[in-house]
Image (cartoon, rainbow, N blue to C red):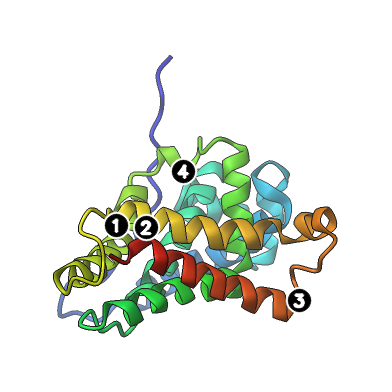
Amino acid sequence: MSTTTTRSPTRKLAAPGRKPGVRELAAQETQDSILRAATRIFAKHGFSGARVDQISKAAKSHDRMIYYYFGSKEGLYIAVLEDLYRRFNDAEARLKLNVEKPEEALVAVVSFMWDYYQRNPEFITLLNDENLHRGKHISKSLRAREYSSPAIQILESVLASGAQKKVFRKDLLGRDVYLMIAGLNYFYLSNRFTLSAFLGEKLENQDAMVHWQQFVIETVLRTVKT
């Protein structure tokens, strides 16, 4: 069985040194509006339940514009997932990390991920939905791998500094530490309501959330320290 790789749209930016024209700005704004609307609709209804006409209406656009810019409903969904990762990376890149103080830098990364997941609930909702589809949409993305590198590189620089200063172990992989941090934060937040019923505790309470954040920080530090 052959597989088809779907390329999400590449925005047409102005040439270096030239300001974008009116048409280019209008096209970019239309795409941005569709992406924002699609993020809301897909987060609410999932890929299977969302309809193109719902998205175009929410974007105050037209169905034909979705097909023009994104090719299909699936192409738009892939673009939304890619945009989730892009925005996460952009936010993480704005962190002011001092790798000369690796412990503080690592705590900042852990706290960033915890806070980001809370401020952007659609990130968790949409990734949960895509995992229900066994990643069949995002696997067609030609950009997905590009977005993992910056996140891993940030951690690797912090871990390398810690190892050089002999406060962190030398055998650590950035990928492993990233998965540990993401897993501990993501699982708690994405399952806190069912876990609250199961454990008989209100895990969404502020005190419980603060406790878990501190627990994750301590767990990660214990794991990486010499």
Report which residue position mark 2 lands on: 177
Residue 26: x and y, percent? 44, 73
Q: Residues within 10 Å of mark 3 (few under 14, many from 20)?
A: few
Residue 160: x and y, percent? 19, 66
Q: Are marks 1 and 2 in contact (CB under 8 Å)?
A: yes
Residue at the top extreme, as displayed = 1
Marks 1 and 2 sit apart, C-alpha to C-alpha, by 5 Å
Amino acid at circle 2 = Val
Residue 126: x and y, percent? 60, 54
Report which residue position mark 3 lands on: 205
| Residue at image point 33% right, 44% down | 142
Q: Residues within 10 Å of mark 2 (few under 14, many from 20)?
A: some
Image quadrant assignment for residue 100:
bottom left
Earlier residue among tags 2 and 3: 2
State whether residue 193 is above or below residue 87.
Answer: above
Marks 1 and 3 sit apart, C-alpha to C-alpha, by 31 Å
Quadrant location, the C terminus: bottom left
Q: Residues within 10 Å of mark 4 (few under 14, many from 20)?
A: many
188 lies left or right of 168 = right
**Closer to the camera: disc 3 or disc 4?**
3
Amino acid at circle 3 = Asn
Which of 138 and 109 lies nearest the eye of the viewer?
109
Q: Are marks 4 and 2 in contact (CB under 8 Å)?
A: no
Q: What secondary structure is found at the residue carrying circle 4?
A: helix
- Could you say which disc has been placed on residue 174 in the image? 1
Q: What secondary structure is found at the residue carrying circle 3?
A: loop
- Could you say which disc has been placed on residue 138 in the image? 4
Earlier residue among tags 4 and 2: 4
Q: Are marks 3 and 4 in contact (CB under 8 Å)?
A: no
| Residue at image point 29% right, 53% down | 146
